[in-house]
Image: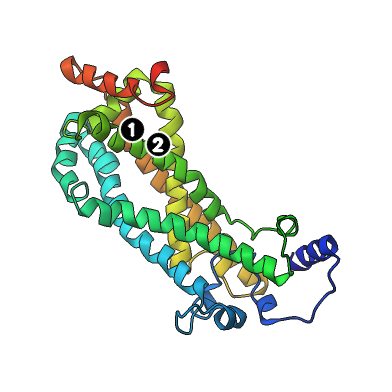
């Protein structure tokens, strides 16, 4: 695959093939996307640590950007686990939106108060996204430098590093998480000045009043989130199929087993979340009285889509 990319880039610029360099031994578009292989994760390619040190010690930018993305996911995983418990597991046990909402409102201050919300949710999520995008752009720049692309038109012809499935899911997750956070957190702060009355009943009311829009957002959100989180952790723990170092027939069997195992865990997490979030909360029915009017007013103020809801 690398030879084909090299040929395409060489033909585009009319470049002469050069002798192999250390960067060729660690291709940018490897199977694990912009993450370096686990066997060399602590040792970036020599050419990067020599030429782009930037005062960062013996490691190059790839080393630090990868670790920013990795360790930021640890903090956000804590929030995800708490959110899963409140929005899926507890509703499954209580079988009641109202009773489950009491647990949500009881524990929510632990991750929706200042400064915990910024430390556990906002900052890790922002760092995770920006470090991944920066790492991809950095890889792209190094590929362009490798082929001597100096002008904008030349750089446009350089192939981008391959995007792995986990990375693609992460990019798809950004607008879904953004929409969820806006409707359930930002909109309420903007219009009401707080979210004291916002909980599972708010979500249930949305499903009852606007089922198509709610299912269109929550089903992809929970599915993509489950696969991205499980595959991401498989990568961090060295359990992804791409990290099997054994060759031959045994290596193929090991990769297949890991692929099925990781996908089975992803599917199990998605089913759990959908069963509690949609099977219980989504069927909780509309709110009544003044609370229903408040929720309807919030939905009507959603930019662009509000007038149609």
Quarter that holds the N terminus: bottom right
Q: Quadrant of residue 192?
A: top left
Query: In this rendering, would 55 be left or right of 81?
Result: right
Q: Which mark is residue 179?
A: 2
User: Residue 277 location, x and y as percent?
Assistant: 32, 35
| Callout 2 crowding tier (Cα within 10 Å): few <14, some 14–19, many ≥20 | some
Query: In this rendering, would 193 be left or right of 77?
Result: left
1 and 2 marks in contact (CB < 8 Å)? yes
Q: Residue at x 16, y 39 (%)?
A: 105
Q: Is residue 33 visible?
A: no
Query: In this rendering, would 228 be left or right of 98?
Result: right
Gap between marks 1 and 2 measured at Cα: 6 Å
- In the depicted structure, whether residue 80 falls above or below residue 97: below
| Callout 1 crowding tier (Cα within 10 Å): few <14, some 14–19, many ≥20 | some
* Closer to us: 121 or 130: 130
Query: In this rendering, would 235 be left or right of 137?
Result: left
Say which element carries label 2.
helix
């Amino acid at each position: 695959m690398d030879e084909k990319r090299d040929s395409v880039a060489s033909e585009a610029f009319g470049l002469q093939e050069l002798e192999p360099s250390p960067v060729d031994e660690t291709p940018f578009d490897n199977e694990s996307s912009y993450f370096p292989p686990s066997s060399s994760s602590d040792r970036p390619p020599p050419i990067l640590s020599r030429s782009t040190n930037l005062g960062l010690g013996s490691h190059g930018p790839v080393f630090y950007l990868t670790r920013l993305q990795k360790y930021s996911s640890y903090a956000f995983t804590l929030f995800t686990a708490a959110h899963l418990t409140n929005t899926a597991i507890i509703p499954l046990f209580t079988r009641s939106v109202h009773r489950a909402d009491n647990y949500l409102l009881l524990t929510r201050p632990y991750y929706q108060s200042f400064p915990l919300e910024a430390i556990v949710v906002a900052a890790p999520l922002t760092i995770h996204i920006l470090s991944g995008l920066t790492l991809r752009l950095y890889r792209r720049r190094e590929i362009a430098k490798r082929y001597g692309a100096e002008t904008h038109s030349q750089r446009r012809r350089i192939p981008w590093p391959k995007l792995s499935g986990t990375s693609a899911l992460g990019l798809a997750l950004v607008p879904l998480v953004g929409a969820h956070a806006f409707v359930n957190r930002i909109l309420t702060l903007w219009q009401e000045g707080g979210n004291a009355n916002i909980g599972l009943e708010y979500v249930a009311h949305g499903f009852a009043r606007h089922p198509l829009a709610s299912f269109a957002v929550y089903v992809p959100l929970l599915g993509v989130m489950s696969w991205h989180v499980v595959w991401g952790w498989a990568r961090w723990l060295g359990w992804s199929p791409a990290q099997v170092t054994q060759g031959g027939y045994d290596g193929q069997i090991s990769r297949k087993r890991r692929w099925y195992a990781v996908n089975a865990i992803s599917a199990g997490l998605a089913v759990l979340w959908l069963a509690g979030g949609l099977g219980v909360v989504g069927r909780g029915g509309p709110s009544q009285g003044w609370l229903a009017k408040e929720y309807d007013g919030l939905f009507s103020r959603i930019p662009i889509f509000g007038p149609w809801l």
